[in-house]
Every structure is written in C-alpha cells, then in structure tokens.
Image (tube, helix red, strand yellow):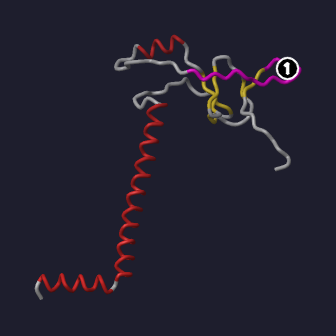
Amino acid sequence: MKTLDIMKRAGRNLRQAKGRTILTSLAIAVGAFTLTASLAVGEGARQYADRLIKSNVDPQSVYVTKEKLRENGAPGAPGLKDYSENATQYAGVTMQSLSADDLARIKDIPNVTRVIPSYLVNTQYIQFEGSDKKYTSDVTTYDPTV
C-alpha cells in the first residue's frame, strides 16, 4: 500500500465516521485543557504560598527565646500559671522574654549579622477576688447549648 492510498483511505474514513471523529477530537481537547488547568492551579497555589511565607517570615532568620515556663514538668501545660512581667504568651505557650542585655550578647556571637527584637504583647492576666496573685491562662468560652 502506497502513502497516497493510505491518505485516501484515512480521508474516506473521516468523512464516513464524522461523529466518532468529532467526539475523539473533543475528548483530546478537553483532556489537554484539563491538564493545563490543573498544572496552572498547582503552580498558582505554590507561588501564592511562597509569596505569603516570604512576606511574613525572613527565611534566613532564627527565633530565640529563653527557656519556656514549665508546669508539671511539661512545656505549655494547660491550667493556670504564675504571672511574670518578663513573660509573654503565644499560641498557648508562655515564654520568658529576652532582655536588652540578652540581645547584646546575641549580637556579639560570631557570624550573627543582625538582631531584630520581636514583641509579643500580652497585657491581660487573671486575678481572683480577694487575692493579690496574678495568673495567665488560655481563655475559652463554654456554651451549654452545644
């Protein structure tokens, strides 16, 4: 069979089976569009996450805190903790704040290029009536209807 004969036969089959040809072409187009759209969505989500992280966090930074306050031997255990003016609470964990002297000592460490303090302000404390003792704790709400 010659190339010309093959081309004639292919053209004849295309004309005779128009429905099948159209559906096959449509399936190929839909598949290609779906793959392209999926790849674009994945790349867009990756770029969004990268921009979000880069705009909020310096990827070359190291966060330093003093030893966390411990309750019953476990860091960040639930319940009341003694109040300290030098402590801050973040994400349920109470940490001792660094002083200006601590920052100066960190600046003196070799290969440390920059020290930028980060402030987590916690201005609320719990004080029971008739007591001078102050506590910090996570506060949650209780709804008896749930």
Task: Label the magenta part by its dominant secondary structure.
Answer: loop
Residue 140 percent coordinates (x, y):
75, 37
Q: Quadrant of the N terminus?
A: bottom left
Residue 110 as seen in the image, left or right of residue 137: left
Q: Is residue 5 magenta?
A: no
Q: Which residue is mark 1?
A: 131
Residue closer to the observer: 117 or 6: 6
Q: Residue at x 85, y 46 (%)?
A: 144
Residue 146 percent coordinates (x, y):
81, 50
Find the residue positioned furthest to the bottom.
Answer: 1
Find the residue positioned furthest to the front.
Answer: 15
In the rendered structure, which amino acid carries the disc numbered 1? Ser
Residue 16 as seen in the image, left or right of residue 59: left
Q: Secondary structure at mark 1?
A: loop
Residue closer to the observer: 51 or 40: 40
Which image quarter: residue 12? bottom left
Q: Which residues are magenta?
A: 119-133
Residue closer to the observer: 54 or 76: 54
Packing grade of label 1 (10 A; few <14, some 14-19, many >=20) is few
Residue 49 percent coordinates (x, y):
46, 41
Q: Residue at x 70, y 20 (%)?
A: 123
Which image quarter: residue 19? bottom left
Q: Residue at x 85, y 20 (%)?
A: 131
Find the residue positioned furthest to the right.
Answer: 130
Residue 54 as seen in the image, left or right of residue 11: right
Q: Is residue 131 magenta?
A: yes
Q: Is residue 102 above or below residue 73?
A: above
Q: Residue at x 43, y 52 (%)?
A: 42
Q: Is residue 132 above or below residue 59?
A: above
Q: Is residue 9 above or below residue 33?
A: below
Residue closer to the observer: 60 or 36: 36
